[in-house]
Image (tube, grey):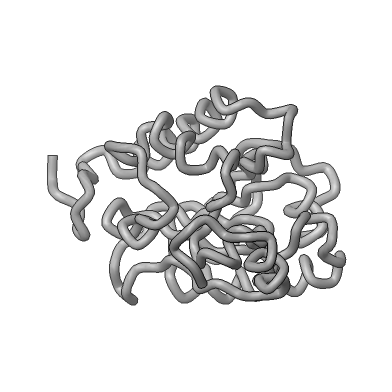
Amino acid sequence: MTTRRPTKADLEAARDREIPDVLPADGTPLRVLFCGINPSLYSGATGHHFARPGNRFWPALHRSGFTDRLLAPAEQHLLPSYGLGITNLASRATARADELTDEELREGGRRLVALVERHRPRYLAVQGVTAYRTAFGRPRARIGPQDDTIGPARVWVLPNPSGLNAGWPLDKIADELARLRRAVEADEPRVRWDGRRTPSRA
């Protein structure tokens, strides 16, 4: 992995590389587990989720009110202090999400169920409605809250924040994330999260 801007050779070398999930220590409260489709080559090269320039995840996360400042991808380790985590449906890095097979997505869905059972987030937020439909056999799923639960987690489908998803500009992605944040906070009206590893009572 590299901390500088990856070169073309770095990106090619990152193909099929896996990067670790961002998760709290067992027993630490997890409000939302964000689930991407799979890492980009840029993320594979840097080791940071949603790292490719033009990806809207980090700006939308801040604009929605989940974080009190804009975090850089290299600060992903701070997410558990906000009660947040990141994983992916498929672990291998590719140039485009459509390089994944349907079976990879379904297998990722099965792995995700086990991960949710272990870490027990309040909400699972899958970022990419087409991938969610394939992974969980829900062909009619739409963006927004789902009727299904996965283990203890309520499910919310978010738009893919990739810059390639031109149909969803940053403001609209942030608005959908803000809808999710309000739903999360409605479940915990007495708890204030302010960047510490444990919630403080309001």
Q: Position of residue 32 (x, y in %)?
A: 44, 53
Residue depicted at x 33% and y 40%: 67
Quarter where residue 185 is shown: top left
Q: Is residue 18 depicted above or below 82 in this figure?
A: below
Residue 62 vs residue 157: left or right?
left
Q: Is residue 108 left or right of residue 124?
A: right
- Residue extending farthest top: 171
Residue furthest left in the image? 201
Can residue 55 be seen here? yes
- Left or right: residue 121 compared with residue 107: left
Quadrant placement of the C terminus: top left
Image coordinates of residue 152 in percent, x first then y, are 49, 62
Residue 180 percent location from the top left of the image: 48, 37
Up/down of 31 relative to 119, above or below: above
Q: Residue at x 68, y 57 (%)?
A: 37
Q: Residue at x 19, y 54 (%)?
A: 196
Question: From the viewer's perspective, is 194 left or right of 181?
Answer: left
Instruction: Give the residue drawn at x 51%, y 67%.
Output: 47
x%, y% of residue 7?
62, 60
Nearer to me, 77 or 174: 77
